[in-house]
Image (cartoon, helix red, strand yellow):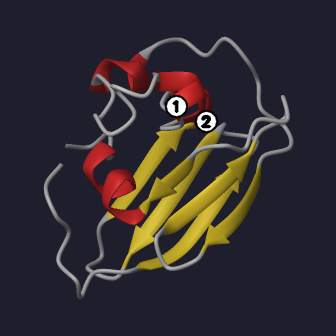
Amino acid sequence: MSSMPETVTCLRVIVNRERQTFDIQWSDNHACSFPLDGLRRACPCAGCQGHEKMHELPDPEIFHLPALVRWENVKVEVAGSVGLRLTWDDGHNSGIFTWERLRAMCPCR
């Protein structure tokens, strides 16, 4: 995973239930828009990815697959200074999406 410049920070996160996206605005004016279902499939926790793959980035194609679930109640909380913890409608909240991981997974790349 490539490192993100230290000067780049997250300015805003929006969960758009209507569009089913998770949007991030970065301080360098870059914006990422993840499909919610793709982001749930990309959960970095050991339970979802297995211990040997939890530090690898998912295949970018995961963000282009048709959604299997419509997410209505995604909660976002800051996980210290490292990133975000998402709690999904299915109750899952084990994965911490680091800032670096979110930036590296950006579907626009």
Going 48% across and 42% down the picture, which residue do you hit?
34
Image check: 95 left or right of 91? left
Distance Cα–Cα, label 2 vs label 1: 20 Å
Going 31% across and 61% down the picture, which residue do you hit?
100
| Amino acid type, mark 2 | Leu
User: Considering depth in this image, is 15 or 77 the residue closer to the camera?
Assistant: 77
Dot 1 falls on a residue whose secondary structure is helix
The reply to whether callout 2 and callout 1 are in contact (CB within 8 Å) is no
First-in-chain label (2 vs 1): 2
The residue under label 2 is 36
**In the rendered image, which quarter contains the C terminus?**
top left
The residue under label 1 is 46
The image quarter containing residue 75 is: bottom right
**In the image, which is nearer the foreground, mark 2 or mark 1?**
1
Asked if residue 16 can be seen in this view, the reply is no
Judged from this view, the residue extending furthest toward the left is: 2
Crowding at dot 1, Cα within 10 Å, few <14 / some 14-19 / many 20+, comes out as some
User: Considering depth in this image, is 101 or 16 the residue closer to the camera?
Assistant: 101
Asked if residue 33 can be seen in this view, the reply is yes
| Amino acid type, mark 1 | Ala
